[in-house]
Amino acid sequence: MERGREGERERQASVSPSLPLSIDDVRAAAERLRGKIHRTPTQHSRTFSALCGCEVYLKLENLQRTGAYKIRGALNRILTLEPDQQRRGVVAASSGNHAQGVALAAATVGVPATIVMPTSAPMAKVAATQGYGAQVILHGQYFDEAHAYALELARGRGLTYVHPFEDWMVMAGQGTIALEVLEDVPDLDVLLVPIGGGGLIAGMSTAARALRPTLRIVGVQAEGSDACYRAFHGTFEGPLVGVTSIADGVVVKQSGQWTMEVIRRCVDEIVVVAEDSICEAMVLLMEREKTVAEGAGALALAALLSRRVTARGARVGVLVSGGNIDLTVMDRVIQYGLTSAGRYLVLTTALEDRPGQLLRLTQLLAEQNVNIVEVVHRRRGVRLPISQVELELTLEARDQAHGRQVIQALRAAGYSVQEHLRAEGRRQ
């Protein structure tokens, strides 16, 4: 539920200086980072503005160095270390963007870096992290095991642990994104930010709240990993079990204690979005904006497209936080997203087992201007009368309305049609 009344926002802004993080920290971070990272564009989208009924501005951090915003916080943290800490080096645990951000940040400053990655980390991300000059250690199957081992290395070798979110200087670095967005669109009404552990939105909301107290700041989490949402609404009862999402960059079992302190004071609202909404947003970003976003990078836009956030007539800033995604995962996402959006239909029907029946069906589909992607013809192993065969069709439609029209035409012609919602793993 939105808490964004103007008086409440001003009250929140007035108490935020008591936090260990301030707009001055974010501005100082921006000076440190100047010339060392990309100033990514804030791009107005006519397509998404028309779809969502508001003016949509995409902040494209998928075009940042390493393909995600993470280098901002990592580099700011490393630049603020004492010379002796820099000499000894840093260590971090991550399976993706944070690993690459720390690795490149350390290389930029000339600091030794060790990154502990779980054995389940995609090899492409392992190779990319090594390519930035870090020593990569594969340990444990999951992040928690890698994190615990990284802390052991920090204690045993005297290294500085660079936390992905529970660090004030990391938050300050991430907050520099808000400075750029509000410089590009100073009269912004709403700002949508993806949330994992909370470091990104903590930094951005600190800066945005100070610069524009009446701005409505909304965090977005994936349904499969909603620890911050639960903590914000007072329903979090301990580390989540079985967290999973296509938005793997924001999958955490619990949010940070420090980040939640900032979020409760500076953020108006947190919403969650479903997996199919995330995939659809990823597909639309590719198709309409010609930009690649990973699952976490598409979260904020997914909230707007799925009407989890309403902002009719407003100027809305949408952070596309990263674009690092494995091509095999992208292929699955495209199929999933197209099916969820009604662009792919997977139908089962029965035909009389005699010549001409398949031709009759395909002619009917041609009349409906639908493209046949795949046909599976089964005579054996199905529970049908001996005189019938089962046909599974994968069809490409224009949209959901066109798909419904095709199904109605088939049923009107006497076909018994069962639709498979492949994207949701169930039938209708």
Image: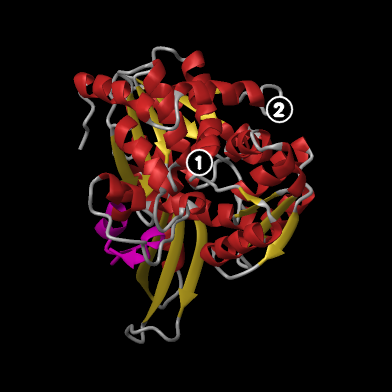
Between 122 and 212, which is closer to the camera in this rendering? 212
Image quadrant holding the C terminus, namely bottom left
Q: Amino acid at mark 2?
A: Lys
Residue 59: image tag: none
Quick check: 236 left or right of 82?
left
Residue 338 vertical position relative to residue 170 in the rendered view, above or below: below
Nearer the observer, 253 or 19: 19
Rendering quarter of residue 267: top left
User: Residue 84 placed where, x, y %?
Assistant: 73, 42
Residue at x 30%, y 37% (from the top left corner): 264
Dot 1 amino acid type:
Gly
Residue 418 covered by magenta stretch: yes
* Residue for badge 2: 36
Which residue occupies 42% across, 46% down? 278
Check whether the beta carbons of the residues at disc 1 and disc 2 lie within 8 A of each other.
Answer: no
Between 230 and 24, which is closer to the camera in this rendering?
Answer: 24
User: Where's residue 279, x and y in %?
Assistant: 45, 48
Q: How many marks?
A: 2
| Magenta-highlighted residues | 408-428
> Residue shown at 35%/53% (left/top)?
227
Say few, some or many: other residues with alpha carbon within 10 Å of mark 1 (under 14 / 14 to 19 / 20 or more). many
Q: Earlier in the sequence, mark 1 or mark 2?
A: 2
The answer to whether residue 341 is visible is: no
In the image, 307: left or right of 36? Answer: left
Residue ID for mark 1:
297
Report, in whole angstroms, how far the alpha carbon at label 1 lies from the one at label 2: 22 Å
Q: Is residue 381 above or below residue 330?
A: below
Q: Residue at x 76, y 36 (%)?
A: 108
